[in-house]
Each structure stands twice: as C-alpha cells, then as structure tokens.
Image (spheres, rainbow, N blue to C red):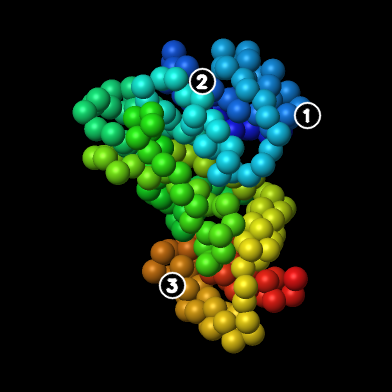
Amino acid sequence: MLLTRDEERNLPRALTSLPRGVKILVVDAYSGDHTVQFARASGAEVLQREWTDFLDARRFAAGRVTTPWTLMVDADEALDDVLREAIVSAPDNLDGYVVRRTTYFCGRPMRLWRDEPLLRLFRTGRARLETRPVTASDAPLHEAWVCDGESAALPGTLLHFSYPDIATYRAKYDHYTSMEAARLTSTPAKALRVYAVSLVRAAWLLFARGAILDGPRGWYVAVRSAFYPAVVNVKALLR
C-alpha cells in the first residue's frame, strides 16, 4: 500500500520496484498532478480521501488491505533487486519482516541514514501503527509499525529518496518541527537543556555515526538533525 499526494515525480519509480503481480493499493489525497493516472496505469486500486495526517491515513489504508500480507512503501521509496526478491521468497511462518532503509540527500546515500530498521512487511492485521515524535510532543509524526508476533530481517535495501535538494529538506524540517512545537509545552530552562544535549549529539552524529565522512552534506544533515529537538522547543516557546 502507498499514500500519495502530488507524487508524479516519485511514484513510477516506487511502483516499478515492487514485485511483479502484487496487488497494489494507493490511497491518494486528491493529487493535482498525474499521480492517479500513473497509479491506475500500473493496475493499482486507487482510493481518494481528504488529507488528515500520516497516522490517520496509514491506518485507513491498512484497514482496506484485503491480501494476507501487507507491504507498506512510501511513494518516495523503492525496493532494490535484492529486497524485492527477498520479499517474494520470504517464508510464511512469521508475522512480520524488517527491512533496512537508506535515505538519500541531494542524490547521495547518507551514512547517518543508512540501514535504518523498519517493519514494513507483515501479516495483515497483525501490526499496529505508533507515532514516535523526536520530542515529548504527541504530534502524529514519525510513525512506525509494530508487530507483537515473531519477525525477522530481510536482506536488501529500501531506498529512500525523500530529499532531492536542500530546499525540500528545509521545507520538511520546518514543517515537522512546527507540527511538534504546536503540541509541546516548553520552558526556557528546558529549551536550554535540550540545546546543550544537541551539541553533544551533533558531535556523536558527526564522528561516531560517520556523517563527517559525507562532506558538507553530511555535516549539514548531522547538525540539523542534532538540533531538531532544540528547534522544536524554541518554536514551542515562541508560539
């Protein structure tokens, strides 16, 4: 299943990476481009509904899956050849499978975002969706599927092309930090503590996680990622 809204740039890549012959469900938030046409041309079933938030939309989509197994892929993601074959041949005796995702920034894979473990293939109805905001906010962001049954890891990589340029990254960063700040209560003392922790985290991401080896792109992402909680707290104070 996939969620879409104006994804004509990404959707064809995602659809062509899926195993041949799988049933595809696309839940579209009334795209204004050719997203729906691309989806239907691929043979996907398309449902349209007004956009609410990621948590609600994913739960809606999951409730419309009629196949024994659910594979959740975002429109800006794609399966590599190894992962695609692993999904097809995965044993049927488990409840879920974890894939490893690598995110690209400005066309390059980032060490900081490499091999992120995500539950994406699971027996339909046997997984639940939880939100995991970076801060103590209860914003419906950063959703993750959780399976209580037995699961295993699949080989291969889920490729994530979320940030084709810096402008896209900044727009998402600003949007997400504002969403978390809108549902967070902060104080000057708390914001100062979070800022201090962010300094330590920036150093850890740069050196322990290897972001420094990715050059200026890696430095930029590491620092922005480290200070994400601090930005949320400052926005919460100023709202």
Query: Could you classify mark 3 by the number of other residues whose Cα lies within 10 Å: few (under 14), some (14-19), or many (20 or more)?
Result: some
Label placed on residue 204: 3
Residue 2 visible in the current orientation: yes
Task: Name the element at disc 3.
Answer: helix
Q: At 53% across and 59% down in the image, what residue appears?
A: 133
The x and y percentages for residue 85 are 34, 25
Q: In the displayed image of the protein, which residue is found farthest to the left?
A: 93
Above or below — where is 79 with respect to 36? below
Which of the 4 image quadrants contains residue 179? bottom right
Observer-side mark, 1 or 3, equals 1
The x and y percentages for residue 148 are 30, 44
Q: At 56% across and 52% down in the image, what residue appears?
A: 141
Mark 1 and 3 residues: CB-CB less than 8 Å, in contact? no
Pointer 1 residue: 32
Which of the 4 image quadrants contains residue 118? top left
* Amino acid type at image mark 1: Gly
Residue 173 visible in the current orientation: no
In the image, 60 versus 219, the foreground residue is: 60
* Amino acid type at image mark 2: Ile
| Image side of residue 224 versus residue 131, left or right | right
Above or below — where is 26 with respect to 230? above
Label placed on residue 24: 2
